[in-house]
Image (tube, rainbow, N blue to C red):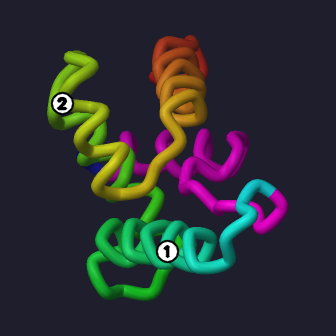
Amino acid sequence: MGCAADVVVMATALASQDPFLMPAKAWFKDPVEHAFKMRESQAGRHAADAASLCEATALRNAYAQWVAVGPEREQRTAVERRLALHWQRMRAWDALTVEVRASPFSS
């Protein structure tokens, strides 16, 4: 992405809600299903952080992968499922990133 773009992505990530899904136990009657969803969520974080064990790297990589597939919904949905990302939070994060990059202060 480049240093300046990475800074914008990280700043907007910190100003946004965590895009990774974190299943709440209250939503699941079956503890096995809840455990499965938790493992799915952790696997998505692990895939995004590229084994660096760094939240900042996971956020940057998740956003980069999500943007890299293009604006088509089907392709972005595939990334969201693979990395266990919340689609509404990703779109809000992207909108904020676009807004910050377009501001006169970012040039």
Secondary structure beneath label 2: helix
Q: Is residue 51 above or below residue 14?
A: below
Give residue 15's quadrant in the image: top right
Q: Which residue is mark 2?
A: 75
Give residue 78's quadrant in the image: top left
Between residues 69 and 101, which one lies in front from this camera angle?
A: 69
Left or right: 62 in relation to 50:
right
Percent x, y of residue 63: 37, 45
At label 1, which amino acid type do we have? Phe
Q: How many marks?
A: 2
Structural distance between the alpha carbons of marks 1 and 2: 24 Å
Numbered range of the magenta stretch: 3-26
Q: Crowding at label 2, few (<14), some or many (≥20) Cα neighbours within 10 Å?
A: some
Asked if the magenta segment contains residue 55, the reply would be no
Left or right: 32 in relation to 58:
right
Percent x, y of residue 97: 51, 28
At 70% across and 45% down in the image, what residue appears? 17
For the view shown, which residue lies furthest in the right direction?
26
Percent x, y of residue 102: 48, 13
Which of disc 2 and disc 1 is earlier in sequence? Answer: 1
Secondary structure beneath label 1: helix
Q: Is residue 23 above or below residue 8?
A: below
| Closer to viewer: mark 1 or mark 2 | 1
